[in-house]
Amino acid sequence: MEEKNNSVFEKSIDFIGVLRKCWIYIILVALVFALVAAVYTSLFVSKTYSSTVKFYVVIDRTSAHYLNTELEAAQALIDSYSVVVKNSDSFLRKVAEQSGLSYTPSQLRSMISVSSIGSEAFSVKVTSIDPQISYNIARVIEDIGPIEMINFVEAGNVKVLNPPLLSLNPDSPNIVRTVMVAAFFGAALVYGAFVILSIFDTRIHSEDDLRRFDIPFLGSVPTMETDSASKKRLSKNEHFETKS
């Protein structure tokens, strides 16, 4: 008895067949999700802009003396310079003052990110909802950053590798990516729902269902036309013959 019950619940899913049944719903829901995502992102998500200044670390014998290689010395200095840029309140106050902004060190800290470029360079990225503010802050960091970092760490040398540029295109939100993700999520949601419905559908739809459940098959009844369908087909044929 247990084996018979298990055979009833064992059902192979025709994923291609499910896709054929629901493809129109997948397209419609994907379009709706994409439209909603585009409207929401455009109207309610703030755009952010960034300007980046890149620095190059010059190693001297003094700073590399206690380390194995110059590359290790450069990486150690980059870590130290990053701490100054991100965590020195005195440096951030000078940046705010020379930028003409009333930002606190904590506010500037949330706008600034530092990342290594290889082993001998690093970048300071300033992000804001105003591209001009991002650019002004990055310019000030370009001007006073090398001197402040060297004075604080008392080792190495820093040169500007690439100055910041005024950004006219927002870094985020990425509307195209957001729309694509929303459309994919909507399509996957619909397809998954149809697959689940197909799994729990215990109705007999074809002869294959009977064979899978080991139910004896005696014969099938062909689909018969109703009187209205038959008359409609005959009227179409007569209309075609008359026109010919």
Image (spheres, rainbow, N blue to C red):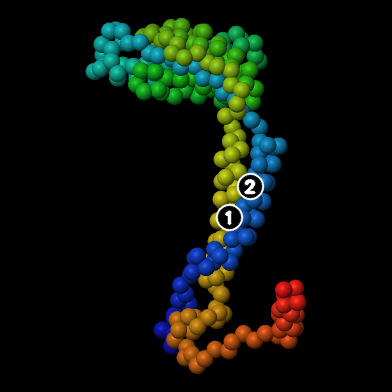
The answer to whether residue 68 of the structure is visible from this angle is yes
Q: Is residue 121 left or right of residue 164?
A: left
Tell me the kind of residue under disc 2: Ala
Q: Position of residue 221 (x, y in %)?
A: 58, 89
The answer to whether residue 105 of the structure is visible from this angle is no
Q: Position of residue 21 (x, y in %)?
A: 58, 66
Mark 1: few/some/many CA within 10 Å (<14, 14-19, 20+): many
Residue pictured at 62% horizontal, 85% vertical: 223
Q: Are marks 1 and 2 in contact (CB under 8 Å)?
A: no
Which residue is under mark 1?
Answer: 187
- Quarter of the image with the N terminus is bottom left
Q: Is residue 64 left or right of residue 151?
A: left
Tell me the kind of residue under disc 1: Ala
- Quarter of the image with the C terminus is bottom right
Q: Is residue 83 left or right of residue 185?
A: left
Mark 2: few/some/many CA within 10 Å (<14, 14-19, 20+): many
User: Disc number at residue 81?
Assistant: none
Q: Is residue 241 left or right of residue 137?
A: right
- Look at the numbered disc 1 and give the secondary structure of its residue: helix
Residue pictured at 55% horizontal, 56% vertical: 188
Which residue is under mark 2?
Answer: 34
Q: Nearer the viewer, residue 140 or 14?
A: 14
Residue pictured at 26% horizontal, 14% vertical: 66
